[in-house]
Amino acid sequence: MARGLWYWAPLLVPGMLQTEAYAQAILGADPEAGENLEDLVRGRLEWQQVLARPKPPVVTVIVDELALHRGVGGPKVTHDQLVHLAEVSERSRIYVHVVPAQVGAHAGLAGAASVADLGEDGTGIAYLDAVARPQTVEDPEVVSQVRLTINALRAEALPRGASRELIMKVAEERWT
């Protein structure tokens, strides 16, 4: 079981914190989803149940501000997703940070990635997102590099409260 989950999301809200409607819009955009869409959405929502455990993993999500402006599923779906993101960021073991657009070039421009920390010894698994073939990698050097990149992005991101304020500002000003 993962002790900590770290996500870098330059384009979308990560699946771990997606609403059902947002997940359906994202997963439904894949031409391969077809008849499996309901199962894919159900699987995503079931994975989120890890957050309902008595002692869930610490989850740190870093999103690029541009992800907040991407309309997914229409204005209501996007608005509701951003409100949900702001609300879950108030939980004690969930940290959401936004890298503001004015940062410009940064370490995360190569794409989305995540790390699951598995033990106190630093073992982990990295997930590297890609269009054609996402990869799960256990190589300690790759996991370490992803951790370094996510830490660099966290240093560029707004603090937790300021991130929540920006999320709500975008939700209310752009998506209502």
Image: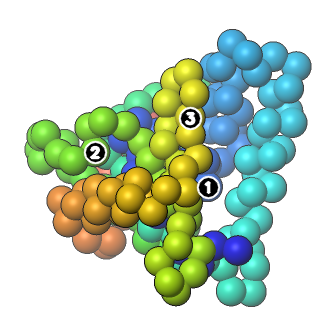
Asked if residue 130 lies left or right of residue 43, the reply is: left
**Mark 1 residue type:** Met
Instruction: Name the quadrant containing residue 159.
Output: bottom left
Q: Earlier in the sequence, mark 1 or mark 2?
A: 1
Instruction: Name the quadrant containing residue 91.
Output: bottom right
- Residue 103: % across, % down: 12, 47
Residue 16: image tag? 1
User: Furthest residue to the top?
Assistant: 31
The answer to whether residue 164 of the structure is visible from this angle is: yes
Q: Secondary structure at mark 1?
A: helix
Q: Which residue is mark 2?
A: 108
Q: Residue at point 66% right, 38% down? A: 23
Asked if residue 164 lies left or right of residue 1, the reply is: left
Residue 103: image tag? none
Residue 134: image tag? 3
Q: Residue at point 56% right, 21% down? A: 132
- Residue 141: % across, % down: 38, 59
Q: CA distance from mark 1 to mark 2?
A: 19 Å
Pair 1/2: label in front: 2
Asked if residue 174 lies left or right of residue 139, the reply is: left
